[in-house]
Image (cartoon, rainbow, N blue to C red):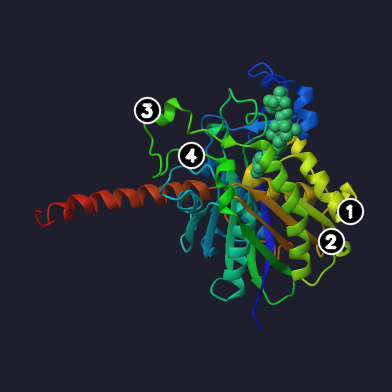
Amino acid sequence: MSPFAHITGWGMTIPERVLTNHEISKMVDTTDEWIRERTGIRERRIASEDQTTASLAVEAALKALRVANLSPSELNLIIVSTSSPEHIFPATASLVQDAIGATHAGAFDLLAACTGFIYALDLAAQSIRSGSINNALVIGSETLSRFTNWNDRTTCILFGDGAGAFVLQSSEEPGGILSAVLRSDGSGGDLLSLPAGGSRHPASLDTIHKGMHFIHMNGREVYRFATRVMAQATREATEKAGLKIEDLALIIPHQANRRIIEAAARSLEIPLERCVINIDRYGNTSTASIPIATIEAVESGCLKRGDRVVFVGFGGGLTWGAVTVQWSGPILPKRKVYPKSYQIWVKIRSHVRRLIRTIEGIIWGSNFPEG
Ligand code: COA
């Protein structure tokens, strides 16, 4: 029988800087009341100058590994889901791999906008269930504040920064990731996009002048799409796992707009209390929102071992999806997975590898045949 993929560790990072609606109302023509009524958001967190998508991801990852009692070198795979990567390449996941010293892991980025964490969870779970790997790290990390047009009141009120990470591990014990539904409709790609910086519109004075490096959104259309797919994906994933909506302890939805979550709860005929909502404090942290909401549910005692939950998300692409999970927890006994000095050694290791590469370049560089 194929092994099961359990979520055995979790960690989140939220920047310290709080940006309130009141502050935004001094930047654009809006009010705290409007933002709260239309979105449910009161405040969001903004990364400091020295925080990046990779640095938030690293912090969340190390916390998750500590909960799982797993050493970074025991990881086989790292997936970073993000729409605000450090670069087009190298992948943010490779930077995270180096920074945490995951010396035996493959690493790649996954881009499915706010649905990315759902896609990444399913991919990691499939790799474990196939028997090809044992331990995976899935991270959702965003610094969308860097791509937000702070003069556009239709988008700048929505987004916030943060990261959440899960460790997934193989076990013969039934449970963990039970089912997944992944969907896309690229015909709606223009409804939510960051048009420039890729190969279609490489960076130029013109793209910058036109503000094409910022998030562009048709809010009304995205809202209509979201209210349609959230309940539908939740139902499909639940049925695929052989469960009924009544069997779910919680639904953990992507935090984009409180009204979208309310509409999904109505459509599923469940009380809103069964949906985890923390959008008031963080805004829309895109692919990080589901792990962050999950971790807060665990830490407040709302999500317990054995509970069955659905994670459901939607976003640019358009993409949407849901994953049914039987919540697990650590499967390894408590042990010191990395000492306090670990981070220093990992940094030294990275610098030494760069130095060796430079020396090799000097030695071998002169031996390259002339072109
Ligand atoms: N403050 C005050 N007024 C605003 C405003 C703001 N921040 N943003 C828009 N408005 C105005 C509009 O200009 C419009 O004015 P008009 O009627 O004079 O043209 C009016 O408010 C209503 O705009 P509308 O877009 O219909 O509002 P809405 O109720 O749909 O709320 C969103 C706007 C963006 C909050 C909502 O559409 C939404 O949340 N959409 C989904 C977005 C999303 O989830 N994106 C991420 C997906 S992962």
* Mark 3–mark 2 distance (CA, rounded to whole Å): 51 Å
Secondary structure under tag 1 reads: loop
Most extreme residue toward the bottom is 1
Query: What residue is pinned by disc 2?
Result: 248
Viewer-nearest of discs 2 and 4: 4
* Mark 1–mark 3 distance (CA, rounded to whole Å): 51 Å
Q: Position of residue 194 (x, y in %)?
A: 52, 39
Q: Is residue 196 left or right of residue 313?
A: left
Q: Earlier in the sequence, mark 2 or mark 1?
A: 2
Locate residue 182: give its quadrant: bottom right
Query: What residue is pinned by disc 3?
Result: 205
Nearest the camera: 276 or 132? 276
Local packing at callout 3 (Cα closer than 10 Å; few below 14, some 14-19, many 20+) is few
Query: What residue is pinned by disc 4?
Result: 195
Viewer-nearest of discs 2 and 1: 1
Q: Earlier in the sequence, mark 4 or mark 3?
A: 4
Going by the numbered disc 1, the residue's amino acid type is Ile
Circles 2, 4 touching at the beta carbon (< 8 Å) = no
